[in-house]
Image (cartoon, coloured by chain):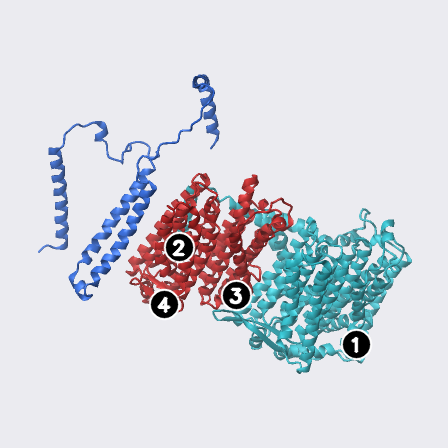
Chain colours: A blue, B red, C cyan
Amino acid sequence: MLTDFGIILLFIIAGFALLGVVLGVGRLLRPDNPNPEKNSTYESGEDPVGNANVQFNVRFYVVALIFVLFEVELVFLFPWAVVFGREDLIAQTEGRWGWFALAEMTVFVGILALGLAYAWAKGYLDWVKPKPHVSQFDSPVPSELYEQLNERYAGKAGKGMEEKSNQLP
Amino acid sequence: MYPIILLSFLGIVVLFLGFAKSKAILLPATLLFLAVALVGNFVEWNQGTIIYFYNMLAVNNLTLAFNGIVLVSAFMIVAMTRGFQDDDEAQPAEYYAIMLFSLVGAFMMIGFENLIMLFLGLEILSVAMYVLTGSDKRNLRSNEAALKYFLMGAFATGILLFGIALLYGATGSFTLTGIQAYIGQGNPSYLLYGGLLLVLIGMLFKVSAAPFHFWTPDVYEGAPTIFTAFMATIVKTAGFAALFRLLSHSFTGIYDYWWITLAVITVLTLLVGNIIAVYQDSFKRMLAYSSISHAGYLLIALTAMTPQTENSILFYSMAYSVATICAFGVLIPLAREKAMTGKPRETYEAFNGLARNNPLLAFVLTVSMLSLAGIPLTAGFWGKFFVFGSAAERGIIWLLVVAILMSAVGIYYYFRVIMAAYMKEGDTAEIRVAPFYKIVLVTATIITLLFGIAPGLFTGLV
Amino acid sequence: MPVTLLVLIPLLPLIGFLINGIGFRHIPKGAVGLIGSLAALGSFAASVAVLLAFKEGGSQPMIVSLFDWIKVGELNIPFSFQVDQLSLLMLMIITGVGSLIHIYSIGYMKHDPGFGKFFSFLNLFLFFMLLLVLGSNYVIMFIGWEGVGLCSYLLIGFWNKNTDFNNAARKAFIMNRIGDLGFLLGIFTIIHAFGSVEYTEVFRQATGLPVGDHVVFAITMLLFVGAMGKSAQIPLYTWLPDAMAGPTPVSALIHAATMVTAGIYMVIRSNVLYTLAPETLEIVAVVGAVTAIFAASIGLLQNDIKKVLAYSTVSQLGYMFLGLGVMAYSASMFHVITHAFFKALLFLGAGSVIHAMSDEQDIRFMGGLRKKLPITFITFAVATWAIAGLPPFAGFFSKDEILAHAFEHNKLLWGIGVLGSALTSFYMFRLLFLTFFGSFRGTHEQEHHLHESPAAMTIPLVILALLSAVGGFIGVPEALGGTHQLAEFMSPLFDTARQVNPEAFAATALTHSEEWILMAVSVAVALIAAVIAYVMYISRSAVPAPESEARTGVENVVYHKYYIDELYDTVFVKPMKSLSGVLSSFGEFVIDLFVEGTGKLVKGLSNLGRQTQTGSIGYYVFAMVVGIVVILFWNLLLN
């Protein structure tokens, strides 16, 4: 008979075995065209090496939050599923147990679903936000004139701006 | 228990009401929901102590009374929002929903029976506050405040959790009764003391006691005023209800161990709050320090922990909340008016000559300042009287002396506002205030005066 | 005793306040004055009725419980009134003199734009003052105590356009707050010691304590700090002369007749406790005597008519405390009563003079007014005679009784008292002569404008003059063949105190002839002082030098009120900035140091503290961690 630690050992062995099988089968099946991009560590599409002080796209957080939410939901569903079908409890309560548990989980999942629906309706799930609004302004001055002007003062203006922005903080 | 379920559900309803074409329905709907929750709250009145959810939550008259204070404060504050109509960027549905959700957190803190519920409630309340603090998205100060609040709050939460873990390690129980039973056996382990101290520190941070108060002025100033009012009243009331519950239910057995630490923190809080408030030029920042100092007065009652403490904290929270709401309630329209004319918005000078054209606002402000300063015939006086009385009963006279001296310092900065409103020359135009807003202010003032004249009406309730 | 009648006493002024306070912009002036005065008069009528009922009912003290006010834990504070000899006497003074002053104000304040506001404040003051004396426990007394302080603040700063007046108001309020802190601490100590604040309960328990008990000493000292603030004793007296910034009827009502005597009321009310604490009584007597002579000497050279009266009030209050200190409780109360009459009269007379002089208050520009203001002159002269302690007017009897007790107790205190009495007589006659005798020294325009005041003002003057003249006969000493009705009336109040310390209440050991000698001495001294004043200011018709003229050393010091205000400013305030060890070296002035230094000290500390708020989150977290480490270290390792 296995002890509790024996079972854990079995789990560990099974874990390694599963990992080996999945990676091995993958290696056999996939096309092999490496490039530096592919070979780098995965970090949500961001460059994994470099200064940590960079700005992430804020939408990552929304997606991550929603992801975590449903992951936690899943974790929560497991213990529930274990007790949901217990025959002794159902028998003791003449069947009300099942309905009660089902109703509670429906409330839980329902609330989460409502949250998802809200995020969806608000458009937080759309990766690409609506295009920026381009102002419709017809200037009587031909656009070439603006460009010439920009070119001529580009150096000076840029410098001035820099100085100003340096003073700000 | 009912308000927890009601507000969880109604919060979602408010969220979805936001999809309606007209935003006008949101404010009345939220107020209606709060009223429903208030009625639901008192269904269980006078039914003794009821325990819910396998020892997770308890309901008795005291928790219901605290819930009532929180709900009424929330009602008044929500009524002052005017539906955020003057701001295009605002997301009123979400603000209201978050406020309702945060109240759920407050109720859990007030009635927790299990430390896990304390933690959950605290987090529900705090996360909601972080969001509301940063809700003025285009204002850098608001962003800064939210980030500061969040970082420091997360830090404090970590400490609280650590403390809970140590308590569990020592006692093998998360429940208040379990911990009490463990202490009753005598000879508790060091883990328990460490856990208690860390939990206390975590909670003291939330009620902004020194030396964990540093976030308060910055956050109070940066947050939109209406949410500052929310923070100053509801978070504080819930925090003190939770602290009282924790200390009175579980840790009276080792009172000799913790009271001196709490007393030192109390003195420090009183000094910091009152003395720094003197130097402030901004009314809003002064109120932030005043809220620190009031945390100090409330801590006196906790430190004393006599049979009187329960009533003192309840009464003080009520008096303080109502007066603070009045103060912010006057500041909001005034600052809006001043912002339009480009004058200083939240400094003392903004109040100059307020009485001439706005006698009602000036009167409301005066009563609220008198109450905060603890002048007789306002509710604030009795709050202080009961708190000091509990300290006297315990015989901690030195603490009493400090507190009374500090309350004299308080006169200085509270009266400055009154002087500005009545005695200085200024040119504040008549400020138009919505009738409903006026009703809220007047009601709050009447509550302050009524309980100032007949405090027995309130203390007799519980 | 009809409860409704009793409730009406404070209720009427409150109603008056509400009507005038809410509607003062809409009610016509005539109606405002009528409502305010009727409220006061109605209250007076009710008080008289209660007094008669009390006497009819066999003079039994009783407590009328109105409702259960507060019940917290084991502490139960009912809202109830106590009717006994003391509260009745105070009621009579407050409502009686108050009514007269209300009527007077109709004339005096007629031209003021804030007429309605003034009357509503005055009514509010009456309400709080009545609450103070009627309450049956220390908490109600404290409510009234704070309330009258607030009204005093509002009324001193009544002409709020003037910054000086505002500062005077704030000074009064803050100084009073210092006193109140003592009072409040005293109440909490009472709660701690006796578990109740009801007079009857506290005194009942106190009788079980030995004489000289430490807790009782602490309580009485703390209460006395409160009394020092409210009744303007050294060192908390400087607010009272400044308080003269308020309208004159206010000075008469609040700063002479009623509010400032609240401290004396409180001590008499707590006579059981004080009797148990002889050390406190010593201190009370010394503070009173020193205040009496100190303030009187300042009064010698003041030139502002109201300032003279203000210092005289401080000095008379000192006499009352001297009386309390030598356990002449009923003599002090006697002096409270007579003082209410003649000091209110003096202030109202001064008001009448100021009114006639078009708001001139400097006596160097008056003179010869007796022909133009005959009624004012006669009444003022009566009051001067009374305050100087010359028979047969009221002041003679009350002051002599105090001095006789002082003589029995301590000859030095008696000496100080007699000297003070000489000074009082001198400066009062100086005031009288400079104002009403000689020739007019004001401008021509003022002279043209001189007129006797309207009837609304002169009638109260006449009534008060009558009272000042005959008021003393309620307490004619046995030595003069009379009966001391007042002492007999008040005697039951001290039954409990007599029980705990019988020796202190032993009958006087002085023989009649000794008493006659004492009386003769003080009368002679006062007469001589009056004669000196006559010689100086009438025979030689000297006029005090104008501001600019150099004065000799001593004179200069006295003229500048011993430089106390400057002293407080420079000696106490400036060193406070550096927080030096000055604190310890000034003994009893510590409290005052706090008064004047608070601002600077707190602001400095505040500035220091403010700098901890850097805005840097790293610093905040660091500070928090330090806090946590200290707490954990201290608790876990050191404990």
Give the side of residue A92 with respect to residue C147, left or right: left
Q: Chain of mark 1?
A: C
As measured in the structure, the alpha-carbon distance from the residue carrying label 3 to the one carrying label 2 is 26 Å
The structure residue drawn at horizontal position 67% and vertical position 50%, both measured from the top left corner, is: C569
Give the side of residue C362 with respect to residue B453, left or right: right
Answer yes or no: are tags 1 and 3 on the same subunit: no
According to the image, label 4 marks what residue?
Answer: B49
**Amino acid, disc 1:** Glu
The mark that comes first in sequence, 2 or 4, is: 4
Question: Contact (CB < 8 A) between labels 2 and 4?
Answer: no
According to the image, label 2 marks what residue?
Answer: B103
The crowding category of the residue bearing disc 4, from other C-alpha atoms within 10 Å (few below 14, some 14 to 19, many at least 20), is some
Q: Does residue A9 appear in this view? A: yes
**Amino acid, disc 2:** Leu
Question: Contact (CB < 8 A) between labels 4 and 1?
Answer: no
The structure residue drawn at horizontal position 60% and vertical position 45%, both measured from the top left corner, is: B429
According to the image, label 1 marks what residue?
Answer: C514
**Picture coordinates of residue B15 (x, y %)?**
37, 49
Residue B455: give its label.
Answer: 3
The quarter of the picture where residue C2 lies is bottom right
Mark 2 or mark 1: which is in front? 2
Q: Tell me the element at label 1.
A: helix
